Image (cartoon, coloured by chain):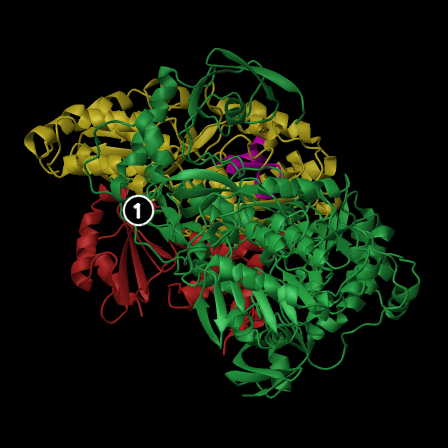
């Protein structure tokens, strides 16, 4: 195949096309519409629907445009009598067994079959026999099935195979009795599963949460950016009146292509959670009472003006807050003379803050991930942290990239890989082994680690893959960021990246993890992402050294913190806690004194800076619920009430512009200074807890998305042990067990799981039922409950 | 207590069955273990009294490192795999054109009457089941049927009686 | 000139044994090729010259098919034999497998040598247990005799051959469906291009030929392409196995020269049963359009003659129908077959074969409507030429053939709600 351009003629028009491409690509590019069902630009060609048959001169039969390569001088007729006859013939066949239930079909009004039938179908069916009926199976809480409507295009099947990387759906049976589905009653578990709803050209696969809620023609569409992972997937909000009815992906080839993760697609349900905070509230003698905004704001301002030693204040900000909110919150705090501002709530090791001088980021363009030749992912279950990023990496792996993982559990991966999984205390050693194999030369703390490391087969193969690759990365994921020796992992990864010519990457965990650094919502960097003159306390120190007053923005104690137990005790012991929150929750109400109802991402204007540093802005598609207000407005008023300068914004755009002006042209850099002396904080002996934040426990919004909470990825509060470890602990036949950590304890169901390394107890964080425990990695004991 | 664990392959089938499957696996390139799925399904079906359970299909999938759905697709596509119990002797009668013109209908009628079952059914004692099949490539011996692995050609009701008589 | 090629050992006792095959010069050609290091091109040239056309039914020139393989392309290549004999009326490959398996094996090894393939698979339909066991036994013998394995007869050429057993699917006789099936998938045809010569089994260059085609190779090499071509007639080289069945006194497989008059074949098969009148003949397997008996009696059995009569020689499966047959009933059964065997992948076949069957069934049941015959013609036309593989055409052709020659009989069914044949 060459890149040469050839000329073809379609319907009398001359077109240029790249040799070797399919006819339908050329006609699509030229805006010549050929009807199709099975063809999809992102999926393999199957040529099964026969809707795109066209007449090609000199060909004896009509040919499918999706599977016919262009050739120079080819003459094509897409609407000649022969072509139309073929297309209409296919249409008739597709309709004979398709039910006439459009009035009650959710796809009605946005159905590809309906649309094409209007152009190519007959008025009256000549088929008078009984139509096919297919019994439906429940395939989980996200996708509703009506397989009687299925036209067997197999887009959903190919999606599972080619994009999601797990084959869950198939075409069983044969002939007219072919059934698309799971064959057995089984939920579809892919974190990208919702895309089959978009792919399905008919109403066979539709959104279960959206089912029967609205008609397509009642909806208006507003562009937006998804607020969970660090990709900032482009979406369209579909609104009816003032309500978000559903979320669809918006094509952006450089970010999410045409896909969307289930988290970004279905989290909108959390917008309408019954525990939304609708009015400002204050706690009086232990009772919550509703108050006016005026009173609430005055009381909130008073909390901060009354604390004279402003170092006694701590601001704990959610990294999924908007850039404007993060910027104003830190501006307010720093203006008051308080530098205790942090948004890295799930991090536990901040020893590199001293030397970090610029904001960390992905280290590579999202779209460049596809073309990697090698990668090492350290402590990252990317599929369950950043699904689209994982999809990009999988593309590279399918194209032959050597991808290795060092992980505290055996990851379920959907591509070829090397994996070294171990108890969390050994992760540093495993990474040091790779660094040693790669010939890393370093002094200080790293030298010590290299000295004791032993390069094994995994280490050598990984190091070689990184070295030999034209384009490679060493990436630190969410599990690494929560590791008590994150600093050591960073230092080793940095050395390894340098030695192998790889790029050092951080997979920022949340929508504004990068933005927060630029906004100065971290103690060591000020607005603009430059080193702070006066470094305040980090998120952990603010809790370990309890403050008198706290400002919380969009967070829930327990669930959103590295050390759930510590966050609750520290906040409860404070004199006053002012919380900007969209929700009421027992954890928040237990420690807060003033609750200020805050708008969510669909209700406020705001910017997200994604993993690669791209600024993307939402513009408030709907009105906030109840009396909730956009966070930037609340913070503006607080600024005014506290007599701060520069809080007179009339438009959120002004806030973004102000921050943007503070940033350099390239404010992101992953430079890790070689640390002089760092000792491992996590022991390699004894029983250690390890834990992730499950995919659908990441932030308050998604935790309230009811359908997602019914899926496997919602996470379960349980003690997971390797069967051998369970035996060692005398728990092999126990149903429940008691876990004790730092004086806290919880009784939880016990699950035996070979994916968990021995010497390790897996207990997820981010869950209400594990929020009373300590940090996700640390010493624990388990015993019979 | 749930156990989420991949079964050890040696726990999946009896050693003799595994050996038979491995003979098929050995015929194909190492990266194409999946090619052995048809042979494997037939082996486990024979071992299970002539039909496949979902569990057996899942076990074959695990043994050959395939997604379960890919095995279901194969098992439901080919007509020789049975997804419901069949008789000890599965009687497959061809009714395609050459057999039809040679009075396969009489053979079918005779069998139905004699066994008291129709196509798709099993006798109460579980000894026989009847199945209508497409051309088995023995039209020179029409009408014909297959029982188990054996072809029986040039049938008459009397010959059918004798054949059934001779079966265990 | 009967039984000269594939059935040449049929007169021997236990002709399937290696020693019997060798007693007729079996494996001598392979030895010669390997010791003389015959240039592969010369073998392909010989096959081209023989006029051998694909005996599975499509009739594509075998030598030409082989020449599409880029012999010197690096990497694994494959020879695949299609023994998934399933076209209704066809039962010739079963006899080759049962009675002359070694000639097929020798043919496959030579094919492998010619295209530079070191691995072969013979795909045998799952119901053929006895032929499968015969063939496996022959493989064992050949392996022990050094005709299979590494460094055959010290030539440096390796060739290994395996059987793949089907499990009941007519569609796997379609070459790309067969390849999918070997890969452990549903037998659903691939869209072509790419053709198997470029992207075949496991994505590698592959030739795939019918059992009879490959079993013919050793004799073509032994006696020369010209010899083979001369047995037959223009455009139809060689002899061919005809499976003749239906209302016949002596049904069976006959290896006779291409171009033999049908009347002679009928005579060899003992004539029509009970001395009845020949009503119609399906000349090349159930997919080939029916030809009225009178017309058939004038035709010769070769590709061109049958094609000129509006049908096709196909796999050489001749089904003779006498005047007791109701053509509506015959078509109903054939349409049911295609409906039952459609793989379900592409729309016109998946949806259309059921439609055809139901309309014919309706007519047979005496519930036909006046517009039904036009509807059948129209639906058949909308399937034909619109599908991924030829099964769509195969389902349409019998319908079109029946309506062309026996429309009156169908019309009678509709008008009178019963059959004009009386016994139907």
Give the residue displayed 17% in from the left and 54% down from the top: B109
A321 on left or right of C336: right
Q: Quadrant of the N terminus of chain C?
A: top left
Up the image or down, B130 lies above or below C44; here it is: below
Quarter occupied by the C terminus of chain C: top left
Circle 1 residue = A148
The tint chain B carries is red
Mark 1, other Cα within 10 Å: few <14 / some 14–19 / many ≥20: some
Q: Chain of mark 1?
A: A
Q: Nearer the viewer, residue A523 or C336?
A: A523
Residue A133: image x %, image y %? 27, 48
| Majority SS type along the magenta span | helix
Please say whether residue C208 is one of the residues in the magenta stretch: yes
Q: Which residues are magenta?
A: C200-220
Q: Is residue A711 left or right of residue B24?
A: left
Relative to A505, does residue A564 appear above or below in the rendering? Answer: below
| Position of residue A690 measured from the top left corner of the image (x, y, whole percent) | 65, 72
Q: Is residue A247 above or below residue C257?
A: below
Residue at the farthest left position = C416
- Residue C74 lies within the magenta run: no
Do we see residue A785 in this rendering? yes
Q: Position of residue A53 (x, y in %)?
A: 42, 25
* In-front residue for pair C340/A393: A393
Colour seen for chain C: yellow
- Camera sees residue C297: no
| Chain painted in green in the figure | A
User: Quadrant of residue B83 in the image?
Assistant: bottom left
Q: Nearer the viewer, residue A708 or C344?
A: A708
């Amino acid at each position: 195949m060459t890149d040469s351009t050839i000329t073809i003629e379609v319907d009398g028009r001359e077109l240029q096309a790249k040799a070797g491409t399919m006819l339908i690509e050329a006609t699509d590019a030229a805006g010549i519409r050929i009807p199709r069902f099975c063809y999809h630009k992102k999926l393999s060609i199957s040529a099964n629907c026969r809707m795109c048959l066209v007449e090609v001169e000199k060909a004896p039969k009509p040919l499918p445009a999706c599977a016919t390569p262009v050739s120079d001088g080819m003459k094509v007729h897409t609407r000649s009598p022969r072509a139309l006859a073929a297309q209409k013939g296919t249409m008739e066949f597709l309709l004979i067994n398709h039910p006439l239930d459009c009035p009650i079909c959710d796809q009605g009004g946005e159905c590809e079959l309906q649309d094409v039938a209007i152009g190519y179908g007959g008025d009256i069916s000549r088929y008078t026999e009984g139509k096919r009926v297919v019994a439906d199976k429940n395939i989980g809480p996200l996708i509703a099935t009506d397989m009687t409507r299925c036209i067997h295009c197999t887009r959903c099947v190919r999606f599972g195979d080619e994009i999601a990387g797990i084959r869950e759906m198939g075409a069983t049976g044969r002939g007219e009795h072919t059934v698309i589905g799971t064959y057995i009653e089984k939920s579809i578990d892919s974190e990208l599963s919702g895309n089959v709803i978009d792919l399905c050209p008919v109403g066979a696969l539709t959104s279960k949460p959206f089912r029967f809620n609205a008609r397509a023609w009642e909806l208006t569409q507003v562009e937006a950016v998804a607020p969970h992972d660090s990709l900032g997937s482009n979406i369209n909000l579909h609104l009816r009146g003032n309500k978000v009815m559903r979320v669809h992906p918006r094509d952006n080839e450089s970010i999410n292509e045409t896909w969307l993760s289930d988290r970004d697609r279905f989290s909108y349900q959390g917008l309408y959670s019954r525990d939304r905070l609708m009015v400002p509230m204050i706690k009086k003698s232990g009772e919550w009472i509703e108050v006016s905004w005026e009173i609430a704001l005055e009381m909130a301002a008073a909390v901060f003006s009354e604390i004279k030693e402003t170092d006694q204040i701590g601001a704990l900000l959610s990294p999924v807050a908007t850039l404007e909110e993060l910027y104003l919150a830190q501006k307010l705090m720093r203006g008051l003379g308080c530098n205790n501002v942090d948004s890295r709530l799930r991090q536990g090791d901040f020893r590199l803050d001293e030397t970090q001088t610029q904001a960390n980021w992905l280290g590579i363009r999202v779209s460049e991930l596809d073309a990697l030749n090698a990668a090492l992912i350290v402590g990252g279950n990317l599929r369950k942290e950043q699904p689209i990023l994982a999809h990009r990496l999988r593309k590279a792996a399918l194209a032959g990239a050597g991808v290795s993982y060092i992980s505290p559990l055996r990851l379920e991966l959907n591509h070829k890989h090397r994996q070294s999984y171990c108890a969390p205390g050994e992760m540093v050693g495993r990474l040091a082994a790779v660094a040693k194999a790669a010939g890393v030369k370093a002094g200080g703390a790293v030298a010590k680690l290299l000295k004791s490391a032993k390069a094994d087969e995994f280490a050598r193969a990984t190091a070689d893959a990184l070295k030999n690759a034209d384009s490679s990365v060493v990436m630190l994921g969410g599990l690494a960021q929560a590791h008590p020796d994150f600093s050591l992992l960073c230092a080793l990864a940095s050395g390894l990246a340098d030695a192998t010519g790889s790029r050092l990457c951080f997979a920022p965990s949340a929508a504004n993890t990068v933005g927060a650094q630029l906004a100065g919502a971290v103690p060591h960097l000020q607005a603009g992402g430059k080193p702070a003159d006066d470094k305040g306390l980090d998120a952990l120190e603010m809790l370990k050294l309890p403050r008198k007053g706290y400002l919380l923005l969009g967070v829930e104690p327990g669930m959103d913190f590295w050390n759930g137990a510590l966050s609750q005790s520290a906040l409860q012991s404070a004199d006053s806690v002012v919380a900007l929150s969209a929700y009421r929750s027992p954890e928040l109400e237990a420690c807060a004194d003033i609750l200020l109802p805050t708008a969510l991402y669909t209700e406020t204007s705001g910017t997200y800076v994604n993993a690669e540093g791209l600024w993307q802005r939402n513009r408030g598609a709907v009105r906030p619920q109840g009396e909730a207000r956009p966070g930037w407005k609340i913070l503006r008023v607080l600024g005014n009430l506290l007599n701060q300068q520069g809080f007179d914004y009339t438009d959120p755009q002004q806030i973004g512009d102000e921050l943007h002006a503070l940033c350099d042209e390239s404010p992101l850099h992953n430079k890790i200074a070689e640390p002089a002396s760092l000792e491992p904080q996590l022991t390699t002996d004894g029983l250690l807890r390890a834990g992730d934040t499950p995919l659908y426990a990441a932030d308050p919004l998604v935790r309230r998305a009811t359908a997602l909470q019914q899926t496997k990825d919602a996470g379960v509060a349980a003690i997971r042990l390797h069967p051998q470890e369970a035996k060692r602990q005398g728990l092999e036949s126990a149903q429940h067990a008691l876990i004790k950590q730092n004086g806290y304890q919880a009784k939880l169901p016990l699950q035996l799981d070979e994916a968990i390394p021995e010497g390790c107890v897996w207990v997820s964080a981010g869950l209400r039922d594990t929020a009373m425990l300590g940090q996700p990695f640390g010493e624990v004991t388990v015993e019979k409950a | 207590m749930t156990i989420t664990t991949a079964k050890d392959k040696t726990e999946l089938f009896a050693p003799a069955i595994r050996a038979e499957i491995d003979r098929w696996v050995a015929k194909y390139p190492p990266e194409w273990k999946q090619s052995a799925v048809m042979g494997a399904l037939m082996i486990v079906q024979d071992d299970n009294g002539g039909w496949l359970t979902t569990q057996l299909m899942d076990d074959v999938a695990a043994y050959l490192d395939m997604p379960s759905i890919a095995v279901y697709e194969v098992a439901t596509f080919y007509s020789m795999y049975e997804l419901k119990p069949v008789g000890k002797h599965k009687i497959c009668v061809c009714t395609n054109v050459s057999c039809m013109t040679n009075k396969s209908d009489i053979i079918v009628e005779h069998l139905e009457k004699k066994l008291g079952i129709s196509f798709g059914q099993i006798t109460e004692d579980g000894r026989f089941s009847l199945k209508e099949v497409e051309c088995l490539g023995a039209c020179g011996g029409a009408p014909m049927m297959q029982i188990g692995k054996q072809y029986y050609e040039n049938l008459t009701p009397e010959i059918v009686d004798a054949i059934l008589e001779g079966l265990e | 000139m009967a039984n000269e090629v594939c059935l040449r050992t049929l007169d021997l006792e236990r002709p399937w044994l290696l020693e019997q095959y060798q007693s007729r010069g079996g494996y001598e050609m392979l030895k010669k090729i390997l010791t003389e290091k015959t240039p592969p091109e010369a073998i392909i040239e010989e096959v081209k010259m023989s006029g051998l056309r694909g005996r599975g039914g499509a009739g594509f020139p075998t030598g030409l098919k082989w020449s599409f393989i880029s012999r010197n392309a690096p990497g694994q290549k494959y020879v695949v034999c299609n023994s998934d004999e399933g076209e209704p009326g066809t039962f010739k490959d079963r006899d080759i497998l049962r009675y002359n398996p070694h000639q097929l094996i020798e043919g496959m090894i030579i094919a492998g040598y010619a295209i530079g393939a070191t691995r072969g698979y013979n795909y045998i339909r799952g119901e053929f247990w006895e032929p499968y066991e015969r063939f496996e036994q022959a493989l064992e013998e050949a392996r022990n005799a050094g005709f299979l394995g590494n460094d055959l007869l010290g030539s440096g050429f390796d060739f290994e051959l395996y059987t793949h057993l089907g499990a009941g699917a007519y569609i796997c006789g379609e070459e790309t469906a067969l390849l999918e099936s070997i890969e452990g998938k549903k037998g659903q045809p691939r869209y072509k291009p790419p053709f198997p010569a470029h992207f075949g089994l496991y994505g590698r260059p592959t030739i795939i030929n019918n059992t009879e085609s490959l079993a013919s190779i050793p004799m073509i090499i032994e006696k020369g392409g010209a010899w083979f071509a001369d047995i037959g007639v223009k455009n139809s080289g060689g002899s061919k196995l005809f499976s003749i069945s239906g209302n016949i006194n002596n049904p069976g497989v006959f290896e006779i020269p291409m171009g033999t008059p049908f009347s002679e074949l009928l005579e060899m098969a003992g004539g029509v049963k009970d001395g009845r009148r020949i009503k119609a003949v399906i000349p090349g397997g159930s997919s080939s359009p029916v030809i009225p008996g009178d017309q058939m009696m004038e035709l010769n059995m070769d590709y061109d003659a049958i094609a000129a009569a509006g049908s096709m020689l196909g796999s050489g499966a001749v089904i003779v129908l006498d005047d007791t047959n109701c053509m509506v009933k015959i078509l109903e059964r054939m349409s049911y077959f295609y409906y039952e065997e459609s793989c379900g992948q592409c729309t016109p076949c998946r949806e259309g074969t059921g439609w055809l069957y139901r309309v014919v069934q309706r007519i047979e049941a005496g519930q036909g409507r006046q517009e039904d015959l036009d509807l059948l013609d129209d639906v058949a036309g909308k399937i034909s030429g619109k599908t991924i593989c030829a099964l769509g055409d195969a389902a349409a052709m019998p319908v079109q053939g029946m309506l062309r020659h026996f429309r009156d009989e169908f019309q009678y069914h509709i008008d009178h709600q019963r059959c004009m044949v009386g016994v139907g």
